[in-house]
């Protein structure tokens, strides 16, 4: 009788874990769809996915500095800047020059 109860308990515990994984997988899928709809690629997509997956309801509000960083990063990506050129541009953009 105890074996049956232990087996049933473990089965229920395992089923609960499977539901948690499914919820996380669904959240990842939803965030991925949003990123694709927004046409995000590279670093922008990675930052969006990180924010989306860590947020309770999807996207989280950005503070003014984060907004500025996002805008500068988008401009640097449009200009296809890489390496030192990108660092210099980002520094100037963020300082308001």
Image: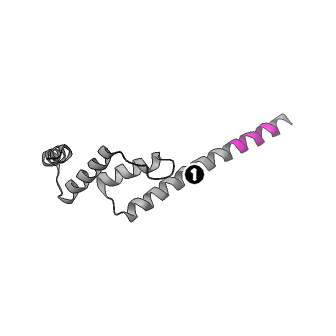
Q: Residue at x 51, y 51 (%)?
A: 57
- Between residues 3 and 50, which one lies in front from this camera angle? 50
**Residue 67: x percent and y percent?**
31, 49
Query: Residue 36 is drawn in which quadrant?
Result: bottom left
Badge 1 is on which residue? 23
- Name the quadrant of the N terminus: top right
**97 left or right, relative to 35:** left
Q: Residues within 10 Å of mark 1 (few under 14, many from 20)?
A: few
- Between residues 70 and 49, which one lies in front from this camera angle? 70
Q: Residue at x 40, y 47 (%)?
A: 50
What colour scheme governs how the chains and residues are painted in the rendered image of this protein?
one colour
Callout 1: helix, strand or loop? helix
Q: Residue at x 51, y 53 (%)?
A: 27
Q: Which residues are magenta?
A: 4-13
**Residue 52: x percent and y percent?**
44, 51
**78 left or right, relative to 66:** left
From the image, give the main secondary structure of the stretch colored magenta.
Answer: helix
């Amino acid at each position: 009788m105890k074996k049956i109860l232990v087996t049933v308990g473990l089965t229920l515990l395992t089923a609960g874990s499977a539901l948690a994984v499914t919820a996380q997988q669904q959240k990842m899928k939803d965030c991925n769809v949003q990123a694709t709809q927004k046409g995000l690629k590279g670093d922008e997509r990675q930052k969006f996915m990180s924010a989306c997956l860590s947020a309770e309801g999807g996207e989280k509000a950005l503070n003014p500095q984060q907004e500025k960083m996002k805008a500068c990063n988008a401009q640097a990506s449009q200009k296809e800047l890489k390496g030192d050129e990108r660092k210099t541009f980002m520094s100037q953009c963020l300082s308001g020059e």
